[in-house]
Amino acid sequence: MIEPWVYAALTATAVLTGFVDAIAGGGGLIMMPALLFAGVPPLNALATNKLQSMFGTATACWNYARKGLVDWRTYRVTLVFIFLGAAAGVAAVQLIKADSLRLVIPLLLMGVALYVIVSPRMTDEDAHERIRVGAYHPLGAALGFYDGFFGPGVGSFYTTTLVALRGAGLTRATALTKLFNLTSNLASVLVFALSGKMFWLLGLTMAAGSITGGWLGSHTAMRFGARVIRPLLVILSLGLTTRLLWSYFAG
C-alpha cells in the first residue's frame, strides 16, 4: 500500500526528472532510486518509471516538433528498429539480471562526457553525416534494447551518436533523441503492461509532473541551445557514472 504523501513526493520528483530528460536524458537515475525508496519493487519501479517518463518525453517531443526540429520521416524505419529493440530489452530484463552492465555503462558514459568536452561538432550547426540513415538502424535497435533492458544514459548515447555519426546539430539531435526515447518508452510500457508489472495509478499521477518538467526542459533547450545542452550532457554523464559506480561497489 503506497501512502498518499508518496504520490505527491514522486510527482514533484517527476517534474525534475522530466526537465532533465527533455534536455540531456538521465532522469531515470533520479526517479528509480526514489521509486525504490518509496517501497516499489524493482520490476514494478522500472515499469512505472517508463509510464511516467513516456508522458514527459511526449510533451518535449511535441514542443520540439512544433519548431520543426523532429525529422521523423527520415528516421521512420529507425523507429521500428528502436521499438523492436526496446520490446526485446524489456522481455530480457525480466529474465536476466542487469548487474553485469553496471561497470560497462560508466565507461561508456565517461566516453560521452569526454566527446562532448573535446569535440568541435558539439554545436547547434549541422555537419556532414558520416554514415547514412540505413547504417544507423542497427545502432538504434541496440540502444532501444539497452533502454528497455537497463536504460541509464540512453539519451546521452542517442544524442552523441546523432551528432558524431549523423551530423545533426546538438539541439536537433536532442529533439530527435526525444522521438527515439518516446518510441522505446512506448514499447517498454506495452510489454510491461502485458506482463502485469505496471502501477497504473502511481504512474499516471507522476505523469503530471513529468509533463510539466518535459515542457519546461524542452523550452529551455530550444531557447539556449548548445549553451545549456552541452554542459548538462557533461554533468549528467559524469553524474550517472558516479551514481552507477557507487551503487555497484556499495552493493
Image (cartoon, rainbow, N blue to C red):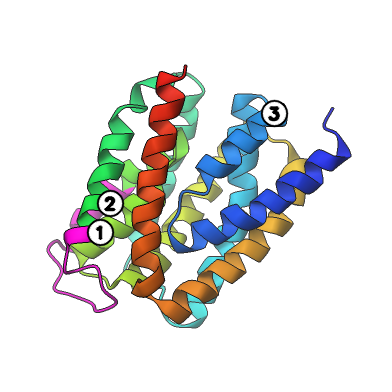
> Spatial distance from mark 3 to mark 2, Cα to Cα?
31 Å
Of the residues shown, which amino acid type is indicated by label 1?
Val
> Spatial distance from mark 1 to mark 2, Cα to Cα?
5 Å
On the image, numbered disc 3 is attached to which residue?
Answer: 40
> Residue 39 falls in which quadrant of the image?
top right
Label 1 sits on a secondary structure element that is helix
Residue 85 visible? The answer is no
Of the residues shown, which amino acid type is indicated by label 3?
Val
On the image, numbered disc 1 is attached to which residue?
Answer: 116
Specify few, some or many for label 3: CA neighbours under 10 Å numbering under 14, 14-19, or 20 or more: some
Q: Which residues are magenta?
A: 116-140
Q: Which quadrant: the N terminus? A: top right
On the image, numbered disc 2 is attached to which residue?
Answer: 113
> Residue 216 falls in which quadrant of the image?
bottom right
Q: Residue at x 42, y 68 (%)?
A: 175
Task: Verify whether residue 117 appears in magenta.
Answer: yes
Q: Are marks 1 and 2 in contact (CB under 8 Å)?
A: yes
